[in-house]
Image: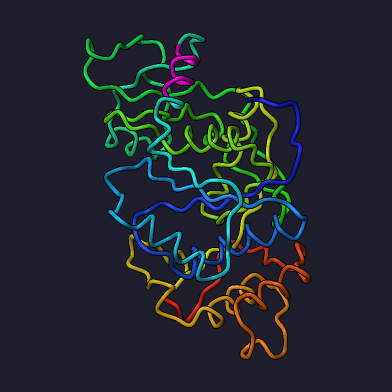
Amino acid sequence: MMTAEFSCIRGRFAPSPSGPLHFGSLVAAVGSYLHAKSQAGQWLVRIEDIDTPRTVPGADSEILRTLEQFGLHWDDSVVWQSQRLDLYQHYFEQFQRQQRLYGCQCNRARIAGLGGVYDGNCQTLRLSSGLDGPLAWRLHAVDVATEFTDLFAGAQQIPSALAAEDYIIKRRDGLFAYQWVVVIDDIEQRISEVIRGADLLQMTPRQQALCRAFGAPVPVYGHLPLAVTAPGHKLSKQNHATDIRRFAPAQSLTAALQFLGQPVPVDATRLSVAELLQFALAHWQNGAVPRQGEIQIDSFN
């Protein structure tokens, strides 16, 4: 599984099935697709349904149909995280044997009282599931950097307290955490580049360190601006952002390209989705992607 280097360019789009795709989702899908495909690479789709309480029945099928409607056709089979629990458990037990994990009984209220960053309170208590009640499991933070270079935004820095935090990889309710499964999936699928929204930028050093802990190559990370309705208020499924299918596909795709700073043909309004994608692939420019973390939009919300 863990190869020494990447044999080819492989990007991915990994939506959560908590609702239909909205304009912000389309931006992430288009950005990841064009970056991989413009390099003659492969583009994969993964359904990140590990957080089962947030999963909406049928949303995964709707998401796949929407991607096809926009001409965003994936290579290889679609992967559902909910079908890979044995894989995540296998590596969890491996890290337990290696004493890289410890049980934690701290609740959210305590951590909120600390300012939101966990202080390592339980790392020496040797808590055990069953004997000490339901536990979350935390990973000892090792070699998590405070700086990294983003493909689009350049040099980035995260707070040292965040880099040093022992973070949860398995929740108290028994569900695996996003930080754990996303790295395992990227490694297993041989993902060489992770192009996604800027809301995940500060988690990148953790994921880079976890790749190294698995002995795996570290993907390139690039973060795209978030579409927001007001500063700090991103479009999201939780905020009931409008289903992108409510708008004409060519109009939405053109807007996504413009949002990403990419050129659009002068006759864009007369072109089909396939023709727009063909033009976009031929003219993709990394350096044109805006460097800011968010961009306010007045439509598609």
* Residue 240 position within the rendered picture, expressed as x and y whole percent measured from the top left: 32, 67
Question: Over which residues does the magenta segment extend?
Answer: 89-96
User: Residue 244: where, in percent of width, then height?
Assistant: 44, 73
Please tell me whether the stretch drawn in magenta is mainly helix, strand or loop: helix
Which quadrant of the figure has residue 113? top left
Classify 248 as above or below 61.
below
Q: Is residue 293 above or below residue 202?
A: below
Image location of residue 267, percent across then percent down: 69, 90
In this view, the residue in front, 160 or 250, is 250
Q: On the rendered structure, is 113 left or right of 94?
A: left
The residue positioned 38% from the left and 57% from the top of the image is 61
**Residue 64: horizontal and vertical position, in percent?**
45, 59
Q: Nearer the viewer, residue 235 or 55?
A: 55
Q: Is residue 122 above or below residue 40?
A: above
Can residue 121 be seen in this snapshot?
A: yes
Which residue is more in the foreground, 161 or 85? 85
Q: Quadrant of the N terminus?
A: top right
Check the image and report above or below for 7 versus 125.
below
Assess whether residue 92 is covered by the magenta stretch. Answer: yes
